[in-house]
Amino acid sequence: MEKAPHIPQHLLSEYDLTTFNFDKSYKIVIERVLERGNLEEWRAIFHYYGAEKILETIEWSKQLDERDKAFSRFFLKSDFLDAA
């Protein structure tokens, strides 16, 4: 199993990250990072979960508003994650 992505405690403040299951709770992690994360955190979830799982979560999510969904789709399909 791959090492869990580095996600700061403040993005998942109500959870104990020492016992948090990043695989079972991937939708929570992806939503939080898409809403509040920085470029480093976006890269972490991209490398851990992959674009397909992130895009699936975007479609499923009731938490993300349409603006966040549209931006996230655009950003994932761009080359910005590989820039800088």
Image (spheres, rainbow, N blue to C red):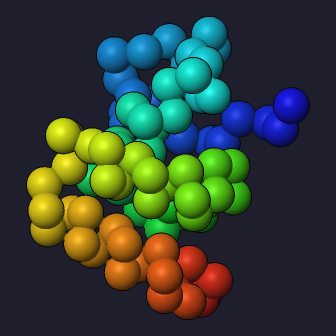
| Numbered-mark total | 0
Image check: 37 left or right of 69? right
Image check: 79 left or right of 28? right
45 lies above or below 9: below
Q: Quadrant of the N terminus?
A: top right
Image check: 35 left or right of 82? left
Q: Quadrant of the C terminus?
A: bottom right
Residue 59 position in % (x across, y down): 32, 53
Residue 4 position in % (x across, y down): 71, 35
Of residues 59 and 49, which is closer to you in this image?
Answer: 59
Residue 50 figure quarter: bottom right
Residue 83 position in % (x across, y down): 59, 89
Residue at (60%, 28%) from the top-left corner? 22
Q: Is residue 22 visible?
A: yes
Residue at (66%, 42%) from the top-left corner? 5
Image check: 67 left or right of 72? left
Residue at (37%, 72%) from the top-left corner? 73
Of residues 18 and 49, which is closer to you in this image?
Answer: 49
72 lies above or below 62: below
77 lies above or below 24: below
54 lies above or below 43: above
Q: Is residue 36 visible?
A: no
Residue 69 position in % (x across, y down): 25, 63
